[in-house]
Image (cartoon, rainbow, N blue to C red):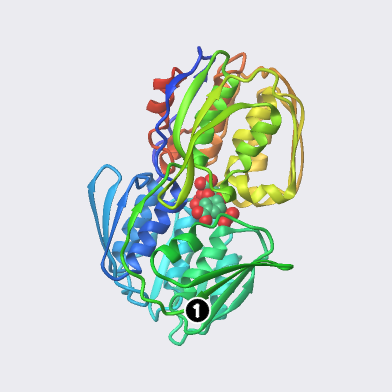
Amino acid sequence: MSAHATPIPMIARRSPALTGVAQIPGDKSISHRALILGALSVGETRITGLLEGQDVLDTAEAMRAFGATVTRLGEGEWIVQGVGVGGFAEPAQVIDCGNSGTGVRLIMGAMATTPITATFTGDASLNKRPMGRITDPLALFGARAVGRQGGKLPMTLVGAAEPVPVRYTLPMPSAQVKSAVLLAGLNAPGETVVIEPEATRDHTERMLRGFGAEVIVEESPEGRVITLKGQPELTGQSVAVPRDPSSAAFPVCAALLVPGSEILVPGVSRNPTRDGLYVTLLEMGADIAFENPREEGGEPVADLRVRHSPGLKGVTTPEDRAASMIDEFPVLSVVAAMAQGTTVMRGVKELRVKESDRIDAMARGLEACGVRIEEDEDTLIVHGTGRVPGGATCETRLDHRIAMSFLVLGLVAEEPVAVDDGGPIATSFPAFEPLMAALGARIARR
Ligand SMILES: O=C(O)C1=C[C@@H](OP(=O)(O)O)[C@@H](O)[C@H](O)C1
Ligand SMILES: C=C(OP(=O)(O)O)C(=O)O
């Protein structure tokens, strides 16, 4: 939904020890995919633990527009009656994906090899983000995009009437581009092959298999080679969505920083393609125990016991780890500011094309709070001194992760930290405020 809501100014203040259990909502990436794959299947898909954030609700609405029946039974419990591979109907209205890059890019992929036409739009943030990275590979299948100059939304996609399979090497590490190509490959005859030089989150490959597609993944000198056999019959499944490690990052980092804290965060996905923040925090000296490791909903999960960790040290995150923690760099930069020494985040230029330019948004906000920063196109450097003066209002730029990161900073900065608009938090983590308040965090609307 792109209606421009009234900004919600918020403020965070130094907080007493955080304690208790943080029940994190469902994984956003897996929630989008459960709805889309459910819509492309024959029969019924039952989803539990679906994230009911606005990004995912927009994808649910889009699946209805393409002809699937999508019903909410209760909190996180949804049913999708699919139309089958190639069965999408032409939507009668513009598809509004709101703030969600994942939503629009995966849905464009899913319709690109069906002979229908659809027009896509989003909010002011999404309409600035690059779509050429999707429309270029979709053109290889025979789809045609007509849009604004520079490959931006709003955009109309004309699906291929006689799609051909493609072999595509990802020019940037992007699970959204990989997923769009694989979803398009579903309705192309023959084999579609995606080669990713750097591994990115693998939920699409895992879930396609779960819905009945043949997907082979091989390691090669060029990277991961993913081969999908086209025109499978996907059948409806039961999907239990695991909890989102990217949302968990906020209470986890807050508990590491706030003196005296100890929290338990149950059932968080430990998929290695999503795990980079946790690897980095341990290198910095974080006290995180991964208890009760097990499998849930096809993903490795564990209960995280997180304790306040004085004496965190700056580290360097290597370029080849960036994809596995791409959404966590904003909150890592907050932890880095409170650590001792320099943290260098390498290979992070994809952050410049997220909901905001996240390198710039974090750099400017941290500087306003008294932190010394260096940056170049592909690197963010935070000079940590173990204390942050705070006392600033930071711009969130329609970006949920920027908003939550600065509110975490406010829990430990010497003066309160405000954000101009906490509204975007509802796109991925609608329960953020009550969940943090229940742990003892002093976060309020102004
Ligand atoms: O595939 C996905 O679900 C996502 C992929 C990532 O984007 P990119 O593919 O642009 O790196 C990530 O930032 C986004 O939050 C979710
Ligand atoms: C980048 C993100 O999402 P999207 O690309 O789906 O808008 C995110 O959630 O941090």
Give the amino acid at mark 1.
Ala
| Looking at the image, residue 264 lies above or below residue 215 | above
Q: Which percent across, then down, holds residue 169?
A: 65, 70
- Would you say 92 lies left or right of 178 here? left
| Looking at the image, residue 170 lies above or below residue 32 | below
| Looking at the image, residue 418 lies above or below residue 15 | below
Q: Residue at x 41, y 49 (%)?
A: 55
Q: Quadrant of the C terminus?
A: top left
Q: Which percent across, then down, holds residue 272?
A: 58, 48
Q: Quadrant of residue 86?
A: bottom left
Q: Residues within 10 Å of mark 1 (few under 14, many from 20)?
A: many
Question: In this rendering, does residue 45 appear at all?
Answer: yes
Q: Residue at x 43, y 69 (%)?
A: 110
- Would you say 39 lies left or right of 326 here? left
Q: Which percent across, then down, holds residue 354?
A: 58, 49
Q: Which percent across, then down, holds residue 87?
A: 32, 76
* Secondary-structure class at tag 1: loop
Q: Which residue is mark 1?
A: 143
Question: Closest to the observer: 314 or 151?
Answer: 314
Question: Closest to the observer: 146 or 215?
Answer: 215
Question: In this rendering, does residue 1 appear at all?
Answer: no
* Ligand 1 neighbours mark 1 (CB distance < 8 Å): no
Question: Closest to the observer: 134 or 25?
Answer: 25
Q: Quadrant of residue 372?
A: top right
Question: Closest to the observer: 138 or 30?
Answer: 30
